[in-house]
Amino acid sequence: MFNFFSLKSISVFLTILVVCASCQSPKVSGETSAREVNFSNNWQFYLAAQASDSISEHTNWRTLNVPHDWSIEGEFKKDHPADLGGGYLPGGLGWYKKTFTVEDANKITIIHFDGVYMDSDVWINGHHVGNRPNGYIGFEYDLTPYLKYNGRENEILVKVDNSKQPNSRWYSGSGIYRNVWLKTIDKLHVDTWGTFITTPNVSTERAEIVLEINLKNEDAEAQDATVITSIYKGNIQVGTATVLASINANDSKTITQNITVEQPQLWSVEHPEMYTAKTEVQVAGQTVDEYTTPFGIRTFEFDLDKGFLLNGEQVKIKGVCNHHDLGPLGSAVNTRALERQLQIMKDMGVNGIRTAHNPPTPELLELCDTMGFIVMDEMFDMWNNTKSPHDYANYWKEWHQKDLEDFIIRDRNHPSIFMWSVGNEIQEQWNEQGVITAKELKAIVRKLDTTRPITVAMNPPVNMPNADVTTQFDVEKASLNPVAASGVLDLIGYNYAHNTFPFHQQNFPETPFIATETTSGLQTRGYYDKKSDTLKRWPVRWDLPFDGGNPGNTVSAYDQVSTPWGSTHEETWKIIKKYDFLSGMYIWTGFDYIGEPTPYVWPSRSSYFGIVDLAGFPKDVYYMYQSEWTDKDVLHIFPHWNWTEGETVDVWAYYNNADEVELFVNGTSQGIKKKEGDDLHVMWRIPFEVGTVKAVSRKDGQVVLEKELKTAEEAATVKLTADRQTISADGKDLSFITVDVVDADGNFVATAQNQLNFSIEGNGEIFAVGNGDPTNHESFKGKTHKALNGKCLVVVRSTDKAGIATLKVTSDGLQEATITVTTK
């Protein structure tokens, strides 16, 4: 149970999970069940020239599949009203329509949208069935009263209005950008998001599973039902329960079932063990509904002294914040692209994800369940007060309760979710209205879930809108934030303010802590400033225009630049690492994202915050975290080795599992370096000479790893590497192909900026291209793109036919190269 009153800890001995394949759509797009089918293919789309356009005035519809983001198809323009927050891409008003037939008039037919950005209206056969302003929450409509049967066609029409700009501080995308499902269910059925699974008592010997199941009867007569739920681990049944229930006509009832699982396999970051609850509803011996709920079993607590404990073991949360866009793919959801992002993070040592700052797509949470991430599930970026003129605050009064309830009910059974965040950097946090709203939101959450702590990601703990926050934190008066000081929150969460972290126990002796957002380091992959040990805070003031920086809007990839409200990567991690009572942190950000190009404005159109760039290529600091957060042997040296003869170069090395690193240039030792105290890297300042730089790490005198960089000659060709050369022929699966510019000897040319051209033959298409450059204005949907510092990305998507797809890359002055991807 959740222990609200313990002065030592906040405990949750519970686990969960609801993602019903039928309700939450966690299935890979295209999969079907007895209850529903994926309804994402063969839509018609029209992008209006202006918001006042009527669809009756044209017939120029385009056939496509959703998820679809029309903004990513547009041009980057400085005068787009979404401005820098939206990445200078267009919004607008779009229409989608689709025809279909329904066979069984005795069933209930429901259309479910996982997310539409934004302000959507839906009609069926000319009947308006609803409006939903929120662009991130799932919603559905009962189409049954308006349907035609006996082979007659029905038409569903969706209007998506993202014309009121700006409405977001980051790139949102536009359209039906998540999956759509058509559900056909009996009049007696398990309701949408209708199961809630908890485990109030867990030990290594047994786990008590409690299921609350909401049955809905839309029949004109009362129904007597037999409800049978079986628990499975893989294909093996490990428990079952049967309950009889009578449900009145046009009514609903929540029933409870209790099942004991012997010797449970607990969910953890390293071993994310999953179970499945299969609920069968029978009437007169006939099955009328089946509902499947994946879940996990675990215990956790946030302790005042020990931080975060999972299944009784201390775990430091090593998390990242990510926005919902998928880089060159835009906001359109793709399961493989999400999986790739999470795998890149996992390989870095990340064990936590914060869904900044909105409800995520269901597929992300399912992946976090099965891959093992500690999720901070976040709902709101604003409450009553706007941050952008047309943002969600305009809909707050009417919609916030409904949206928050749906969010909690949808997500509350995921074993990967360990805390709810009901706000991010809310403007009301500085006054008593913020306390009132926080109490209201907490009450809404508590009514639906008592098993997880509630937090708000708050700003630095003093109200100094014009302060230089690097020098004016009052670390002993952090509780000046009224929401933080109110006692409403179960977890104190700060964005930045890393210098206050060691004082947390003094300021909040009864409330555990999580660093909800940290760092905001700034880097462009492959660019390096001199000298590397000169720290820079860009922009100088958050509230004033920035006229400094580098030519070409670059930022050094040494860990030496951050925002003034943040820190370098090393600065914050050293503090989090030092104190056990600090549960962990979520870094801003894991990946670069479109929009918010701090510290710059146009022509920059995407962020510099990511540990990984927009194309998915790690920046150098990735390996600092890998050396700290994983057990694998790490030795990473940088920068590249293409400079001017005699130029002074700072060579950094991130390493672990070794006592020392020795650096050689053309075989001559440059000295041995060892990390001292809390150092996280070592550095040599040496003159450049053409040839080879090599680093050797040793432990107890034995070589652990060797790494070398060579001076590259003129670019000669490209090397193509696919993350997967065999993908599914489902029209959705992706192969991410890295294009490396190399010289005649195969050495990587780290300064290459060649213009690359792409073509494809066979059973595949070029779905997106990118290079990670925040200033590049070439289309992500084009067939040509420049390399950024030797690298470019091509994303190949399968068709629905098996075969092969051959990608060809050409460039003036370079030998062409090809790679083949098999689809089956």
Image (cartoon, helix red, strand yellow):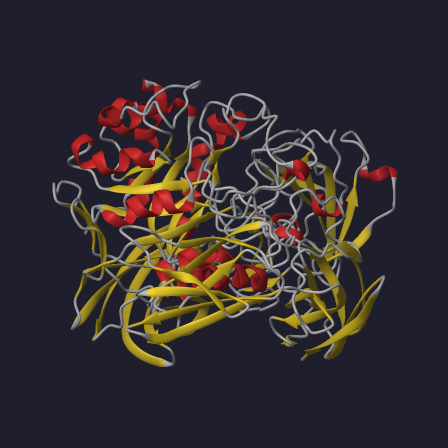
Asked if 501 appears above or below 277 in the picture, the reply is: above
Q: Nearer the viewer, residue 742 or 466?
A: 742
Q: Nearer the viewer, residue 770 or 111?
A: 770
Q: Position of residue 427 (x, y in %)?
A: 42, 24
Q: Position of residue 457 (x, y in %)?
A: 37, 36
The picture quadrant where one finds residue 566 is top left
- Residue 18 visible in image: yes
Task: Name the residue: 16% across, 67% down.
Answer: 203
Task: Name the residue: 39% across, 22% down.
Answer: 428
Report the side of 692 relative to 672 (left or right): right
The picture quadrant where one finds residue 793 is bottom right
Task: Name the residue: 68% across, 36% down.
Answer: 161
Q: Nearer the viewer, residue 702 or 109?
A: 702
Report the side of 57 relative to 421 (left or right): right
Q: Position of residue 162 (x, y in %)?
A: 67, 35
- Residue 20 visible in image: no
Q: Position of residue 122 (x, y in %)?
A: 65, 42
Asked if 433 appears above or below 266 in the picture, the reply is: above
Most distant residue in the left direction: 7
Q: Nearer the viewer, residue 805 or 396?
A: 805
Asked if 463 appears above or below 105 in the picture, the reply is: above
Asked if 583 appears above or below 435 in the picture, the reply is: below
Which quarter of the image is occupied by the C terminus? bottom right
Q: How many marks?
A: 0
